[in-house]
Image: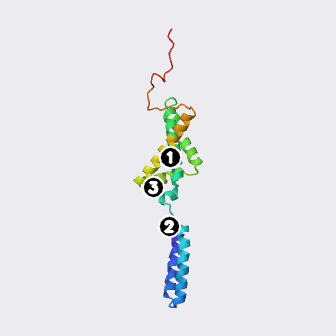
Amino acid sequence: MCNSFIYQIINRFQVFRNNKTLFGTVKKISLFILFIFFLLPSCGVFSGKGECERIIEKDKMIEIMTDIYLLESYVQVESRTNTSMRDSMDYFYAGLFEKYDVSKETFDKAFECYSLDGEKITYLQEEVLNNLSIMESEAIEEGIPIDRPDQEDTPLDKPSQEVE
């Protein structure tokens, strides 16, 4: 819609350019420039957002990616004891995307867009790790035990055995 509208404006500008009266031309060009100045930002031509942010904004993308990391971690831990946990992944993802009011296709498109720019995807990943670190700190402060599958149990973590 914006492209056809801009095309019409350019055609009208050519008509204005053919007008030979100086005052009329200056007035028309001034109006044209003002019109363009206010019209193009509404079409997104001069917006500060990149192509990826028009799909899903950075902050929202970071929140979604953080929740995906938590979801994947949860399923990984739970699938040790519940082998059918992986079968529920589609259900879990559907709930996650519903929470953020995006479709899987929209998320995939945004993720692909961000992934094409190394700086953008690195920034997103760093922010996800920051969010996870903050969540971990808050959990520790509240006294919530943190189960890390990559750590082996130390003797202090194992329950003491009574000697008979």
Report whether 103 appears left or right of 116. Answer: right
Disc ID at residue 29: none
Residue 110, compared with residue 8, is above or below; it is above
Residue 9, compared with residue 152, is above or below; it is below
**Helix, strand or loop at disc 3?**
helix
Disc ID at residue 46: 2
Answer yes or no: do the residues labelled 2 and 1 have beta carbons within 8 Å?
A: no
Residue 52, compared with residue 141, is above or below; it is below
Q: Position of residue 3 (x, y in %)?
A: 51, 71
When asked about the image quadrant of residue 94, the answer is top right
When asked about the image quadrant of residue 5, the answer is bottom right
Q: Which residue is mark 3?
A: 113
If the image is split into quadrants, where does the N terminus sit? bottom right
Residue ID at (52%, 82%): 29
Disc ID at residue 65: 1
Foreground of the two, 103 or 50:
50
**Helix, strand or loop at disc 2?**
loop
Gap between marks 2 and 3, in whole Å? 19 Å
Gap between marks 2 and 1, in whole Å? 28 Å
Gap between marks 3 and 1, in whole Å? 14 Å
Answer yes or no: do the residues labelled 2 and 3 have beta carbons within 8 Å?
A: no
